[in-house]
Image (cartoon, rainbow, N blue to C red):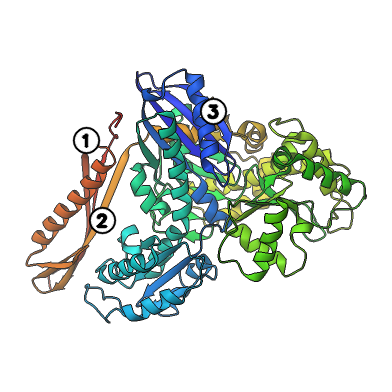
Amino acid sequence: MTYLLGVDTGGTYTDAVIIDEATDTVVASAKALTSRPDLAMGIGEAIDTALTEAKIAPVDIAMVSLSTTLATNALVEGQGGRVALVAIGFDQADLGRAGLTEALRGDPVIGLAGGHNHAGGEVVALDLTALEAALKALEPGITGFAVAANFATRNPAHEVAARDMIRNLTGKPVSCSHELSQALGGPKRALTAVLNARLIGMIDRLITACETHLALVGIPARLMVVRGDGALVSAVVAREKPIETILSGPAASIAGASWLSGETDALVSDIGGTTTDVCLLRDGRPKIDPQGARVGPFRTMVEAVAMRTTGLGGDSEVHVVEGMSGGLHLGPRRLMPISLAAQHFPELVHQTLDRGLAQDLPASDGGQFVIPLWDALPEGLDPRERAVAQRLAEGGPLRMGHAVQSRPEGPALARMVARGQVILAGVTPSDAAHALGLASAWDAEAAEKALTLFARRRSGAGGRLAPDGAKLAQQIVDQLMAQTVDFLLQAAFAEDDRGWDDSVALARHPLTRAGLDGHQGLLRMQMSLGVPVVGLGASAATYYGAVGQRLGASMVLPQHGGVANAIGAVVGQVQMQATGTVSSAGEGAFSVHLPGGPKVYASKDQALAALETHLRTDAAARARASGVEDIRYSVSSDISEIEIEGRAMFIEAKMRVEASGRPRIASE
């Protein structure tokens, strides 16, 4: 018998599922809490539990595939390692485009002379002396480097030279923009390289944790990783290009949704701990975003499913809306639920909450806790960050008011949260679900206490948020439903064939709301979704019944929907793309832009043939490295020509070769 093991690591849970390949059935599934900083604990627990339930030997597992939302969550929450960008041939204005400034978050930029022109010719010699001096002057704490040069897709020589020097001098990982995308648009390529460099350490730790446990229990199968477009890649490729795993979890969930539900046309909504991901399924397939994956505020050059992601999940932070109207808002930051924190640190949480409840006043620090996520004190902290970290190192998890003891230390803590060095624990929808009896995995008593304390906060009108914790819990659950409905409506308006202009405004328009209410007056209004919604995620069954009712839509909650990501991880195929360009270098001269620099041919046909040969070889080599033996090829070209005096003049050609197939299902 041959079995496939799918593993999905999310912000809250790590899932494992075992599928019998011969019968295409799920024989076991398991969940474990995602463990930080040691991800191996959660991965190991989920895999071991699934193996025990399936009653099979580890050697019977023929393939393992991993999907994750960690990269997506990190970008939504502004987390990840500290990076340095080496920008070659760009001016200051370039660095302010494509969201690059926001993505850098104050991390250092090394600007160098250099770069190439559109034809691949060197504009200015690369200043490696300046690079060496700048590298030696960097402060400690940099975890990786991003290198982007002007027109590197036409000639990557300067990026390659800078990469080699950085690796030799620092030993740190380096992300080159030309290795991530062959598209023009320097600032956007630089943004993609920055995000890739920021994620390298996180994804490497995840893959290492999975590989370590597979070896420990004796599973000899190859490890694959789900890419953001739903295709599978080898773990080696995912380590080098972790940016390609953004939307990995959501892409796997789409494949899992189609496999589980049998629906071919539906909105798929996957709620996790940190985010909700929505995608349209048409004819059984998700659409690929032609502009590149968008996560949070960032539009990258990474191919991925056309997924809409919002910072709304079961562990979203609960905010009080300012102003007289008051109300609540959830997300985008993820907190550790109080009910979960109380399981790990019962004495600290219960004693703090009991003291707060005895005072009949709202907690001055919001009733939150600060939990360190490090094995050793992090490097590169500024003095205020170090002061907070030292208290946490000496006292372990602390209530917010003890961890932060001055106003300037608040921003210092926020920076540590953004870097993933600490996590805050506070009231979340998961706590509301426990208080209402909708969930029972964690400490419901702690949730009830925290909600009672939170209810004492004042709204903009001056009164208490809620008369008691139970009423507040229901308000939080209602708010999650309302924000989910709003987000699904935005997706529906954006994907509808009519081509509506402003999906956000339309989703919130009074006429839309009246239609959902079924208003009956001088006007009779009715609105509903025209396709079913497939609800996925561990908490979908808790919240999504009301969502379907509000939208007037059929809500499909498939069996095993809580582990759909893990299922989707093992039902996909390897798809390796290689892209390249031929440009006109003058009359009778056609430049093929290759990794070693441009090569000129005398005719267009010769240039296109040479490019196709190179791209086929490149794509096939990477497909074989990911275990594909029976390769299928797909070649597409986009040739731009203009007519001058009745004669076609060649401008440019873009070619794409895809090598695809199922990875070999066999132990190595």
Q: Which mark is residue 579?
A: 2
Query: Residue 402, can we see it?
Result: yes
The residue sitting at 47% across, 41% down in the picture is: 209
Q: Which residue is mark 1?
A: 629
- Front residue of 223/606: it is 223
- Front residue of 192/143: it is 143
Instruction: Please say if 308 is above or below 443.
Output: below
- Numbered circles on residues, count: 3
- Could you tell me how far apart the alpha carbons at marks 2 and 3 are, in whole angstroms? 40 Å
* Image location of residue 647, percent across then percent down: 11, 69
Frontmost of labels 2 and 3 is: 3
- Asked if disc 2 and disc 3 are in contact, CB closer than 8 Å, the reply is no
* Image location of residue 92, percent across then percent down: 44, 80
Q: Which residue is mark 3?
A: 30
Among numbered discs 2 and 3, the one appearing first in the sequence: 3
Instruction: Please say if 374 is above or below 157.
Output: above
Q: Quadrant of the N terminus?
A: top left
- Could you tell me how far apart the alpha carbons at marks 1 and 2 are, in whole angstroms? 21 Å
- Asked if disc 1 and disc 2 are in contact, CB closer than 8 Å, the reply is no
The residue sitting at 8% across, 60% down in the picture is: 606
Q: Amino acid at mark 1?
A: Glu
- Front residue of 614/420: it is 420
Q: Amino acid at mark 3?
A: Ala
- Could you tell me how far apart the alpha carbons at marks 1 and 3 are, in whole angstroms? 32 Å
The residue sitting at 84% across, 47% down in the picture is: 453
Among numbered discs 1 and 2, the one appearing first in the sequence: 2
- Asked if disc 1 and disc 3 are in contact, CB closer than 8 Å, the reply is no
Q: Amino acid at mark 2?
A: Thr
